[in-house]
Amino acid sequence: MHATLPLMRHYGFPALRRSRLETLQVNLGYKCNQSCLHCHVNAGPTRTEMMSRDTLADVLVFVQVSKIKSLDITGGAPELHPHFRELVSRARALGVQVLDRCNLTILLEPGHEDLADFLARNRVQVTASLPCYTEELVDRQRGKGVYERSIQALRKLNALGYGAAGSGLELNLVYNPQGPSLPPAQEPLQADYKRVLGERFGVVFNRLLTLANMPIQRFGSTLISKGQFNEYMRLLHGAHREENLEAVMCRTLLSVDWQGYVYDCDFNQMLGLPLRLKGHARPQLSDLIARDLAGNPIAVRDHCYGCTAGQGSSCGGALAA
C-alpha cells in the first residue's frame, strides 16, 4: 500500500475553521463483507478493528452533552459491530437522528436477515452505496454478484416503506466515479438512477449523493501504481471552487475512529491527521465533552481539494447545484 500523505503538500489548501458542531460521524471499525476498489477506509472481511464498549459509552455521553443533531454511523460495514443495534437504539432514545452508511448487501448476510426491519422500526436514515445503476460497473468496482444482491436489498427496504413519499423513512444512494474523474452533475444523474432502477426493478429512493473518490488509502495507492496520482491531483486542484469552502462538511462534522480518536473528517482519519487541539497531540472524544469547537482550525492537506472541486463533494453529496 503506497502512502499518500507525504504527497499532500504541493498545492497548499486554504486555511479553514470550524463552525457549530451538528454531526458526529462514528467509525465503528474497518471490518466489512466487501472489499471495494474505491474504498478510502481500506475495509474488508479480514479487518478486525472494532470500537470498544467504553468508547461507545463516550459517544453517547458526547452526543447528549453536546446536543448533537445527527449521529452518522459508518465503517467498514458498521452493522457488523456487535453493539451496533444498542448504539442506534440508545441514540434514538435521546432524540438524535441516526444515519446508517450501509453497503446494502449486509442486509442479506446470515444473521442480519432482520436488520432492515430494525432500521425501519427505529426510523434510521439509510445512505446506501450503489456506485452505478448498471450491473457491469457495480460488479467491477465492488465484486461479482454485488449488484444483484444490492437490488434485492433495495427491494427489501422499499417493502418496509423506505424511499416512499410521506413514509418518513429516508433512503439515499451514493455514487462514486469508476476512476480518476470528477462526479457528473448530481441532479441529472439522480434522474437517470430513478428512471433506470424504477423501470427495471421498481426500486424507489429519495436522493442520490455524488461523492468524489479521495486520493487516499486503496484508491490513492492504485493511482500511484498506475502513474495517475499527480494527474488526478492536478484535476482536483484545477477544479477548485472557492465558494465551496463555506459548505465543506468538516466545518460542522466531527469524525471519531474505532479507538475514540477525533478528526475533522473521515478522510483525515484515514490519513492519520488528528483534530488540532491545544494541549492534545492526538485528542480523544472524551477530551472534548462539553467543549466548544467553533473557531477551531481544521487540519487540511491537498486531498481536501476532493471536497471543493467542481460541484463539491461531501458525505451529504454535492455542495452546489
Image (cartoon, grey):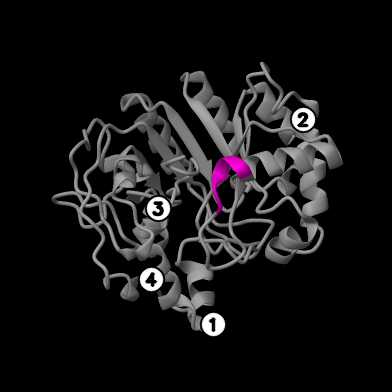
Q: Which mark is residue 234?
A: 4
Q: Which mark is residue 307?
A: 3
Identify the residue at horizontal 46%, vertical 20% (top origin).
94
Q: Which is in the foreground here, disc 2 or disc 3? A: 3
Q: Which is in the foreground here, disc 3 or disc 4? A: 4
Q: Quadrant of residue 23?
A: top left
| Highlighted magenta segment, given as a residue range | 184-188
Dot 4 or dot 2, earlier in sequence: 2
Asked whether 271 or 164 is in front, the reply is: 164
Please say if 302 is above or below 107.
Answer: below
Secondary structure beneath dot 4 equals: helix
Secondary structure beneath dot 3 equals: helix
Q: Which is in the foreground here, disc 1 or disc 2? A: 1
Dot 3 or dot 1, earlier in sequence: 1
Q: Quadrant of residue 215?
A: bottom left
Asked whether 261 or 138 is in front, the reply is: 138
Q: Name the residue at the top extreme.
A: 166
In the figure, is residue 26 to the left or right of 161?
left
Q: Is residue 109 visible?
A: no
Dot 1 or dot 4, earlier in sequence: 1
